[in-house]
Structure formats: C-alpha cells, structure tokens
Image (cartoon, rainbow, N blue to C red):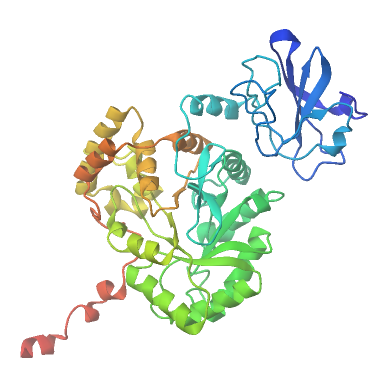
Amino acid sequence: MQDENEADWVMWGEVAGDNGFHVMAYDVPSHLPWNQGEKPFFVSVRGDDTEGDQRPVGQARRRLDDREPAGARPVGTAVRHAHRPLRHHMGPGRHRCVQRLNQPTDLTCLRRPGRRNARAARTAQAPNTYGSGRKRGTVRTRKLGRTGIEVSAYCLGTMMFGKMGNPDHGDCVRMIHRALDAGINCVDTADVYGYSETEEIVGKALKGRRDEVVLATKFNGPMGKDPNRSGSSRRWVLQAVEGSLKRLQTDYIDVYQIHHPDPHTDIEETLSALTDLVRAGKVRTIGSSNLPASDIVEAQWVSQQRGQHRLRTEQPTYSILNRGIEREVLPTCRRYGLGVLVWSPLAMGLLTGHYRKNAPRPNNARMQWVSRHLTDERKLDAVEQLLTLAEETGHSLTHVAMAFATSHPDVTAAIIGPRTMDQLDDLLVGATLTLGDDILDKIDAIVPPGTDLSPLDVSYAPPSLTRTNLRRRPAHERAAA
C-alpha cells in the first residue's frame, strides 16, 4: 500500500490468516485532506498474490461476483486495488466486516479495542432479531409513523444529563457518542431538562455528527418565573424554539414536541405557530407528549380544518406497569399514522429490580421525586412476579421490560434514560432480545392489557380530575338536589 502519508497512520490491528492472508486496520489522522470531520477508518486486505485490495468504509454491502467465497459478505460496491490512489476511495465512518476474496478464512470482523469491543463480544453471541425494521449497528430502525423518517427502536433520552443526574459533561458526551456508535440515531431532550443545561450538552455532543441524528426536543415547561415563559402560546413557542436552537447548536430540529397539554391555550394557536416553524425550515416535523386520545383527535381535526401541519408523533408513558395507553391512545395514534416514542419503559426505575417489596427504601432523589410510585404495593407485588418470570427467561428484568415496550406494533421506539456509561452499556446489550408469545402471555397475566396499576406521580392529569369544581357541583346545588 503506497501513500506519502502512510507513515502517519496508526495501525491498531493486524491479523494473519490462511495462505498469507492479512487484515490490517488503520486510524487515519485528522490532518489528512480527506478527513470530513470524523476520523476516517480504513481496512487493507493483503494476500501473497497481490499487493492488496482496499475497501472503503460506509458503502453498502453487496455480493461482488461468483468469485466470492460461499457465505462471505464483503463491504463495498467494488474491489479497490492498490494501484489506485487511496485518496479516491477513503471516507469517514467505521468498518464493520471484511472478507478477502478467494481466501478461505474465519477472519470476518475487526473491532476497535476497549470496552466497545467487550460489548460487541457479548451482543454477538445471539443473532439480532430485534424489531421489524432494518438493522443499524446493534439496534434496528423503524419508520416514525408516516413521516418517512427512520429511527432506531431505542431512542436516547437525556433527562439524566446535567445537574438532574450526571453533572460530568464530558461523560455525558461520551455516552451520546457510544449510543450513536451502537446504532441509536434518535436523541430526545427538552428545554427544561437540567434547566437548559441538557440541551447544551447534547449540542456539544452532536458537533460533526448532527446529520446522523434525528433530534427531538420539547417545549411547554416553565423556563423562569415569568408566567409567559411557559405553556403553548404562539408567543412562547416562537421564543422557545430560538433558545433550543441556540443551545443545541443547530439550524433545525427534527421533531419539535409539545411537552404537556395546555388546557389554557387553544390548540389552533399552538399549531399555527408550529406550522410557521415548519415552513421556515426551523422544524422538520411536530409532535406532542402526554396527550389524551381526545386531545389527539381534536388536534388532528383542527389541522385538517385550518390547513395547518398535523402532529405527527406522540410521546406517552408506557411500561409493563403502566399499560393504560393500550386502550385508546395507541389505537388513536395508529388511526392517524402517528409515530410513538414511549417514555419510562422501566417505570421510573421500578423495573430494574432495584426497588423491592419489604426492602429498605433508598434515600435518593428519585425516591423523593416519585415516592408514591416507587412505594406502591400493587406495583411492588407485580415487580416480584416479574423478577421470577425474568429469571425463567435467563435475562434481567431490565432487558425483559425494554423488549416488552418495543414489542407493541404501535410503538415506534422506547426512550432509554441512562445516567452512567454502565447503565447505557447494559441497555445496549439487551437490544437484541425479543420475547416469545409465551412470555408476553405471562406478562399479560401479571398486568392485564390496558391496565395502569396506578398513575405515575408525574403523569399528566386533566383539569377534569384535578379541579374539584369540575368534579363536584357547588354545595348549595347538591343540597337543593
């Protein structure tokens, strides 16, 4: 392999195979002219009969011709020979697999050393049958409703990045990169997470990788003491998006979502503002979070009648312990072709097995935040049964819970919310798990379909439930009746 910059390359792997077969992998330094913002990665395959075949990274897999060994899946659309200048076929990305033509060998995959390599060894033990879409890394992708956008079946939630969870910005950035490298292409955040700090972390992490990511954020929560810096008014929507764009260091948001229903604002007011943002190119598509089925229907009707952009996604809570959306919300989303990104598939931590019946209660921030949920006896009883069921499957309850959430045909993706790298690695290991009908039937027996064992402390409750004057007639009217 000839190139004037070859001496600057860093070779991190060279493996010899049968008949003089060699696979050599290089990191190419950033100062080379073909670097496009990521460190290019290049693989050279050499045999005794030729100086080498070079195959560029990031091209589609395809069987080359009849000379290919049976079962081999080389990378690249053509064999690149050494007499061609390397600069013509170098490119950014990472190499996945390589197989030398006409050389029998079991050397089919090279990975970078380190923790990522260890995770790859664990996930490679079983075939990836996760989801119904196209494989991307260790996570499959699915269509986001009828938007035409394709997202990974795991979406990286970032609420735990920043002062609310992990205050180490560098560690949070590394976690985002780890998720992207594993095939997760959807990142969800919100302006209120970490009091704007989280969006800033996400913006740092996506420098140079923005086009790889379907970026979703939300507005509606209070962003200060000023009462007009919250809600879903046109005034605030147009102001909130500018703040998010600046913090995220991007020109556009892929999915801009109403964080919570706003019963004090006409939905037409909100949709008109969101429509203008789409037409201005600042937002690609719009969605909602925590909307009841009736509000979803009303929003669709208003869009049709007023010629405004429709809400295309919904983000409800969904887990084994909270299945209420199966009754009306998910069927409504299916009817209107909405993509569904479910949050808290691990039920705010209850489905990790860290909170047990009759066990000491940990004195942590989560216990103070959602104590009613974490100490609910019905839920704790169900967790004990689910732990026993998970042991029968040979998997952790965390992995079973995630596989359950993504098994519903109307769920596009489940949002994971790791706080540490170890938590993220564990979630990625479970991304290949699918549950059989027998296990899903047993889950249905523990928590029947469409059942919320009890609402989450942070779940949206409409005014018809929270305001007593909407639930009770005045005392004098009740007495007169």
Position of the N terminus, as image quadrant, is top right
Looking at the image, residue 414 lies above or below residue 113: below
Looking at the image, residue 471 lies above or below residue 373: below
Residue 459 appears in view? no
In the visual, does 74 lie left or right of 328? right
* Foreground of the two, 283 or 95: 95
Residue pushed farthest front?
Answer: 66
Q: Which residue is found at the position 61% from the left and 67% from the top?
A: 283
Q: Which residue is found at the position 46% from the left and 34% from the top?
A: 426
Residue 175 appears in view? yes
In the visual, does 126 lie left or right of 96? left
* Foreground of the two, 317 or 444: 444
Query: x, y percentage for residue 278?
Result: 60, 72
Looking at the image, residue 58 lies above or below residue 27: below
Position of the C terminus, as image quadrant, is bottom left
Q: Which residue is found at the position 24% from the left and 47% from the top?
A: 379
Q: Total marks drawn?
A: 0
Query: x, y percentage for residue 296?
Result: 39, 71
**Rendering quarter of residue 410:** bottom left
Query: x, y percentage for residue 411?
Result: 40, 53
